[in-house]
Image (spheres, rainbow, N blue to C red):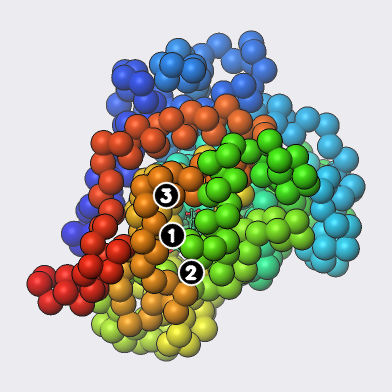
């Protein structure tokens, strides 16, 4: 195993073990590990044992577990229902322009209750993985803001990938899907993990459809939703429809933009100003009432990969691998299971300007989806700010918009306060808990801080020469 893979594995394991904070005892990982859940999401009495972190940060119970450290599927389904309540899936989600919303719905997959119900069943079904241990919700766990809150994800056979699982919240509003944009729609994307060898592991879509094809309930639901047999394409469509119900836009920041000045703190308001001015975040993270997500939907190299990669060699390897096998399945495998993952958008476009570039992340709900960046290497939003403050990690392909920012500690705290104001109100409690935890961590350790670089007292090449 390469040194990096080994490091990732150790880091992921630590994360799992340390996941239920506040000094609670943890079980052996893979078994009954206690992990925090979004407090207040599940109706009291729904389950006997669960792990909610109360205000003081103490664990008081335990969440029923599934494999790979996820919350059990039944528990997650109830949590999902509690989060969303009764919704009319054919209506435009509150706060969205109907024309914009329509544009995100494929012509062959209009929203219907039957399709969403089918997609929901599939999303939580571990039979969609070859060994029956992994569902979509293993890595996009409802109790963890629809991510796994780990650096990189774990699929069948406990295999670790190379990328951090993004949240599926608001993914319905993205112009391209996957961190390198290699998929055009949610309906297409949802088919890919099923055949990825390190995620759900079926050899092809047909085998996956066969695995559930005899289930009379599925037969009935497919017929109702799409008028036919159980099949792979419609599996993707149904899950796409289900994911289009995961719209979470109700943040304090939104109320602020609508004119409610006091909806966010004075620090957060100053953070918003810095975000648009000295800190230059807005040059990529577009954020306004008509574009609430905080992404320009474009791809930039912000110097994350450059920390641990020799791009030149990787580019040669990547080009060779894709020449030998240009299939979609191969690209899928290279992106998740090999060092070439770090090339990002380049593997999709083969443009040199896309080397090490990833899609500008959404910032809504960012407070609750740690760790950060495509490889999950930044644990807190303070680490993210340290990364940007020094101008990212220097490399030949760094985006022109990246440069040292010379922000003070106070200003960093203010931008972070702003970022924590972007979380949907339904996760307010978890957001506060995350903020406290991240702050405590940052007070102890700021591994990416480099004040000399941030203030241009040192130039990037000096570090490289000294190495
Ligand atoms: C083993 C963990 C794992 C499983 C299982 C998994 N995902 Fe993911 N998911 C990830 C990772 C990691 C990424 C990022 C991969 C990339 O961008 O290359 C991702 C990306 C996504 C995205 C893209 C979000 C964005 O910001 O572009 C969506 C949507 C998504 N997954 C939905 C699903 C669905 C639906 C399923 C089930 C069919 C599923 N995932 C199964 C780990 C997983
Ligand atoms: C040059 C464009 C650019 C600028 C400027 C920029 N970002 Fe980003 N941001 C990105 C891209 C691209 C990513 C994804 C990088 C990756 O995953 O490797 C990202 C990722 C992030 C993430 C992590 C998201 C996640 O889910 O993991 C946060 C938080 C963030 N940016 C906040 C900021 C803030 C705050 C600023 C201003 C100080 C800023 N960004 C400036 C393009 C930019």
Residue sitting at x 39%, y 77%: 398
Q: Which residue is mark 1?
A: 374
Position of the N terminus by quadrant: bottom left
Q: Which residue is mark 3?
A: 412
- Which residue in the rendered view is the most extreme toward the left? 466
Q: Report if the CB atoms under discs 1 and 2 are less than 8 Å apart.
A: yes
* Nearest the eye: 293 or 324: 293
Compare marks 2 and 3 and give the one earlier in the sequence: 2
Query: How far apart are the alpha carbons under marks 1 and 2?
Result: 8 Å
Helix, strand or loop status at disc 2: strand
Q: Quadrant of residue 192?
A: bottom right
Query: Label 1: few (<14), some or many (≥20) within 10 Å?
Result: many
Q: Report if the CB atoms under discs 2 and 3 are less than 8 Å apart.
A: no
Q: Which mark is residue 341?
A: none
Q: Report if the CB atoms under discs 1 and 3 are less than 8 Å apart.
A: no
Residue 183 location (% of width, % of height): 61, 69
Q: Which residue is mark 2?
A: 358
């Amino acid at each position: 195993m390469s040194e990096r893979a080994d490091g990732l594995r150790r880091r992921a394991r630590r994360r799992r073990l340390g996941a239920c904070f506040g000094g609670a005892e943890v079980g052996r990982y893979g078994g009954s590990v206690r992990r925090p859940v979004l407090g207040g999401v599940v109706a009291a009495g729904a389950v006997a044992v669960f792990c909610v972190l109360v205000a003081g940060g103490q664990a008081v119970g335990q969440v029923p577990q599934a494999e790979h450290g996820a919350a059990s599927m039944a528990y997650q389904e109830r949590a999902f229902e509690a989060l969303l309540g009764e919704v009319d899936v054919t209506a435009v989600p509150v706060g969205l322009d109907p024309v914009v919303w329509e544009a995100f719905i494929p012509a062959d997959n209009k929203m219907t209750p039957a399709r969403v119900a089918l997609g929901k069943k599939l999303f939580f079904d571990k039979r969609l993985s070859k060994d029956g241990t992994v569902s979509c919700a293993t890595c996009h766990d409802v109790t963890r803001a629809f991510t796994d809150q780990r650096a990189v994800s774990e699929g069948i056979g406990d295999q670790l990938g190379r990328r951090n699982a993004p949240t599926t919240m608001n993914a319905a509003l993205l112009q391209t899907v996957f961190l390198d944009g290699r998929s055009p729609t949610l309906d297409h994307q949802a088919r890919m993990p099923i055949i990825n060898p390190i995620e759900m592991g079926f050899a092809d879509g047909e085998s996956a459809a066969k695995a559930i094809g005899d289930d009379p309930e599925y037969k009935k639901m497919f017929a109702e939703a799409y008028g036919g047999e159980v099949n792979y394409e419609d599996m993707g469509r149904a899950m796409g429809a289900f994911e289009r119900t995961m719209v979470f836009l109700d943040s304090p920041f939104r109320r602020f933009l609508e004119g409610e000045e006091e909806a966010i703190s004075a620090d957060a308001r100053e953070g918003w100003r810095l975000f648009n001015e000295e800190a230059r975040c807005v040059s990529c993270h577009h954020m306004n009432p008509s574009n609430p997500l905080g992404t320009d939907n474009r791809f930039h190299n912000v110097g994350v990969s450059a920390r641990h990669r020799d791009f030149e060699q990787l580019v040669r390897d990547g080009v060779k691998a894709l020449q030998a096998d240009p299939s979609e399945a191969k690209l899928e495998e290279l992106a998740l299971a090999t060092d070439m993952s770090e090339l990002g958008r380049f593997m999709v476009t083969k443009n040199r300007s896309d080397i090490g570039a990833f899609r500008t992340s959404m910032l809504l709900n960012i407070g609750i989806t740690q760790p950060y960046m495509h490889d999950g290497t930044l644990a807190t939003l303070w680490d993210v700010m340290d990364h940007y403050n020094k101008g990212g990690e220097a490399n030949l392909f760094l985006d022109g918009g990246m440069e040292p920012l010379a922000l003070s500690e106070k200003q960093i705290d203010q931008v972070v306060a702003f970022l924590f104001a972007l979380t949907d109100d339904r996760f307010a409690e978890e957001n506060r808990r995350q903020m406290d935890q991240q702050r405590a961590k940052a007070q102890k350790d700021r591994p990416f801080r480099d004040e000399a670089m941030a203030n241009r007292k040192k130039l990037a090449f000096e570090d490289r020469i000294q190495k």
